């Protein structure tokens, strides 16, 4: 799994012009599910995400976690994170997991993360408009196979 983690002051998502989710301070997570991912990948990512010390303490240092600040998460499925751009000029999505299986893992990821922190999500497979008020900006890329 590949996750783009963005520290936000707020974030929201719209589908067909209708806002379906909004959060305040916390993380916007774009999640791509790739072939070979399983529950172990979810567990590694969730554990890492909730404990990452990427929020400022009273001295302005990145020293607090999502749990420490009681932050929220907006989780958005994004299969394009599984793309390969090595050849040619058009992305290849051969590594992206098939939609039905990817949906199940995305839902499990959201469930497990949502058990630990307040979580809202986008709509899997939909064309979404995501408004991200990146705080910093602070952005990290996590690959579950590298954790």
Image (cartoon, rainbow, N blue to C red):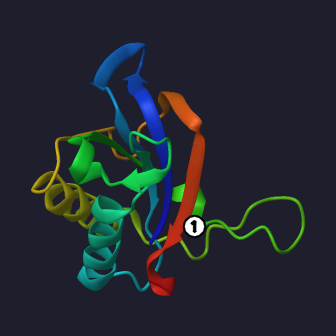
- From the viewer's perspective, is residue 108 above or below residue 30? below
Residue found at the far right of this picture: 88
Front-most of residues 128 and 50: 50
Quarter of the image with the N terminus is: bottom left
Any part of residue 78 in sight: no
Secondary structure beneath dot 1 equals helix
Left or right: where 52 falls relative to 109? right
Any part of residue 70 in sight: yes
Left or right: where 140 falls relative to 122? right
Residue found at the far front of this picture: 59
Residue found at the far left of this picture: 115
Left or right: where 52 falls relative to 81? left
Give the image location of residue 93, x and y in percent: 62, 67
Query: What's the residue at 86%, 73% (across, down)?
Result: 87
Give the image location of residue 11, x and y in percent: 41, 28
Front-most of residues 109 and 58: 58
Give the image location of residue 60, x and y in percent: 50, 41
Give the image location of residue 145, x and y in percent: 47, 85
Query: What's the residue at 39%, 39% (across, down)?
Result: 58
- From the viewer's perspective, is residue 44 above or below residue 29? below
Quarter of the image with the C terminus is: bottom left
- From the viewer's perspective, is residue 132 above or below residue 33? above
Query: What's the residue at 51%, 57% (across, down)?
Result: 79
Which residue bears the numbered disc 1? 82
Residue found at the far top of this picture: 17
Left or right: where 44 falls relative to 79? left
Query: What's the residue at 44%, 78% (across, down)?
Result: 144
């Amino acid at each position: 799994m590949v996750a783009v983690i963005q520290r936000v002051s707020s974030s929201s998502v719209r589908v067909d012009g209708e806002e379906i989710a909004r959060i305040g301070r916390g993380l916007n997570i774009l999640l791509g599910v790739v072939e070979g991912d399983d529950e172990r990948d979810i567990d590694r990512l969730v554990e890492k995400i909730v404990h990452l010390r990427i929020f400022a303490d009273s001295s302005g240092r990145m020293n607090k976690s999502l749990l420490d600040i009681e932050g929220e998460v907006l989780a958005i499925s994004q299969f394009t994170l599984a793309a390969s751009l090595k050849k040619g000029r058009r992305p290849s999505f051969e590594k992206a997991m098939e939609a039905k299986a990817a949906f199940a893992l995305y839902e499990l990821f959201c469930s497990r993360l949502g058990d630990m922190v307040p979580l809202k999500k986008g709509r899997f497979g939909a064309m979404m408009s995501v408004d991200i008020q990146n705080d910093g900006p602070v952005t990290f890329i996590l690959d579950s196979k590298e954790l």
